[in-house]
Amino acid sequence: MSKKAEKIYTPKIVAFLCTWCSYAGADLAGTGRNQYPPNIRVIRIPCSGRINPVYIIKALLEGADGVMVSGCHPGDCHYLVGNYYARRRFVVLKKLLTTAGFDPDKVHFTWVSASEGARFADVVREVTEKVSALGISMETTAAMTEKDSSVTEFPHKNRRRDDSAVFQEQQEELIALCKKLLEDETVSRIIGFQQGGEMGMSLPCIIEAPGEADKLVWNERCVPNLSGYLSELSEKDGKTAIVAKPCDARAVVNLIKENQLKRDDVYIIGLGCNGMVNNNGELLHGCLDCSVHVPPVYDVYIGDEDGSYGTLTTGDEDGSYDSLTTPPTKVGTPPLEGNSLCQGGRPSFTQERFADEMSKCILCFSCRQSCYGCYCKTCFMERGEPDWQTASPDMGAKMLYHLGRAMHLSGRCVGCGACENACASGVDIRYLIHEVKQFIEQTYDYKTGMDLETEPAMLIYKADDPEIGFLELR
Ligand code: FES
């Protein structure tokens, strides 16, 4: 530890130690008289696989200067595979925290066995040194003051579409199909869209008789992800059909894989889609970087197989047209790696961005209500033991909610943008979830909801999974 850092403060580090290995390793360090800094506050846990990532987030937000987690070495877990599952969670959590602006050196994961007393002392020394070098925690809720609601805009141009004829064609086919499905009793009900929302938005509707099929619509304002309604409907008798854009269909697939739905209870009417628009005629943010235009799984498909709709164009007022597939560039999108939060005593760009978004949030939970992936009967924020939510919607509570939710959605988010579309305060939390989604795609070669066979990335492990961001001893 540098003398300067030592003088400034002595950090408090919460250490989660698996009782079977690392806790015993700590004991051995004591009996072996291996000295280490007295900065850690140990929490003994049965297995590293039992650590809810929200505990780590909560510790940081409540003022811990650092967190370390140590379990049995891979292959040595007392419960055989607990640490294999934990490893993926830790890697993704670290990615999430660094994307939100936390310094990577605040959270450390490692393995220490019961016979490695000297290694335990080395680990604590190393972690203490790294955390001390960061200076006084700036992530504490007290330090994270409320900011102005300056909005970070996506600089995408107005995009016009000329595919009303295609939508019309698809809608006619959809209505005829739905009549037939209800007439021959293939399905008992169909969940789709009808006119009637504010500013031309199409609304979800459920039809149960062939005569009602004429009220179904299919257009560029069919924005909501309908899959969230399925779990409840599947408890009724008979099959439920769903009008599914590619993102809705991917969500249905993921619900099936997470045992929230039975494949036999749902009939997927897949519709080709090149993106939905907002009331200004601009493609929604979630659609700008979407590359899945045909539902990957369906019972029947309405649309071009290759997802091309001929007349679809995008462009600027002056008539200069971009390719639809040009990805959006976010204003000031920060570099993903190597963000440093506290060095020099100033918050990094990423922390400011996150704080800006959080300052807009009023904890109304509309993002959770609109999200297909938030299917828990009781959200972690509303559980009494421990009591996660503070009485007032302060910055800490907002950050805990959004980071905890983002973690829950890792490997589950299909990028439909429902959360962002539902938020009346204009909070863009999708940027955070999107980065984690991409990271999972690249690291574990898993794209959510693309087939019924591949196991969700966060529910499995591989013995040789990379340990990205884990502690390396010098
Ligand atoms: Fe130690 Fe599972 S028992 S990590």
Image: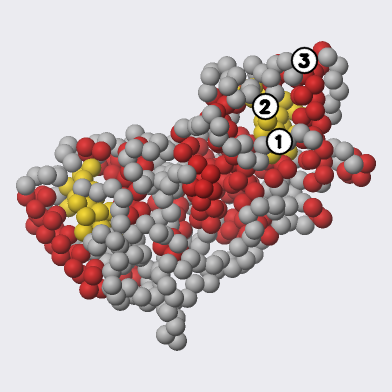
Q: Residue furthest top?
A: 31
Position above or below: 427 against 91: below
Residue type, mark 2 in image: Trp
How many numbered marks appear?
3
Q: Which numbered disc, 2 or 1, marks the residue that appears first in the sequence?
A: 2
Compute the Cα span from label 3 to label 1. 21 Å
Residue nearest the observer in this picture, 406 or 474? 474
* Image quarter (top left, top right, bottom left or bottom right) of the N terminus: top right
Residue type, mark 1 in image: Leu
* Residue 184 seen in this snapshot: yes
Q: Kindly identify which residue carries mark 2.
A: 111
Residue nearest the observer in this picture, 140 or 315? 315
Counting from the top left corner in percent of width and height, residue 191 is at 23, 51
Q: Is residue 454 left or right of residue 346?
A: left
The residue at the point 33 percent across, 59 percent down is 293
SS type, badge 2: strand
* Image quarter (top left, top right, bottom left or bottom right) of the C terminus: top right
SS type, badge 3: helix
Counting from the top left corner in percent of width and height, residue 441 is at 48, 47
> For residue 145, which quarter of the picture?
bottom right
Whether the residue under disc 2 has CB within 8 Å of ligand 1:
yes
Q: Is residue 343 left or right of residue 242?
A: right
Mark 2 or mark 3, whichever is nearer to me? 2
> For residue 239, which quarter of the picture?
top left
Q: Which numbered disc, 3 or 1, marks the residue that appears first in the sequence?
A: 3
SS type, badge 1: loop
For residue 471, the mark is 1
The residue at the point 43 percent across, 54 percent down is 415
For residue 28, the mark is 3
Compute the Cα span from label 2 to label 3. 15 Å
Q: Is residue 269 left or right of residue 154?
A: left
The residue at the point 36 percent across, 47 percent down is 450
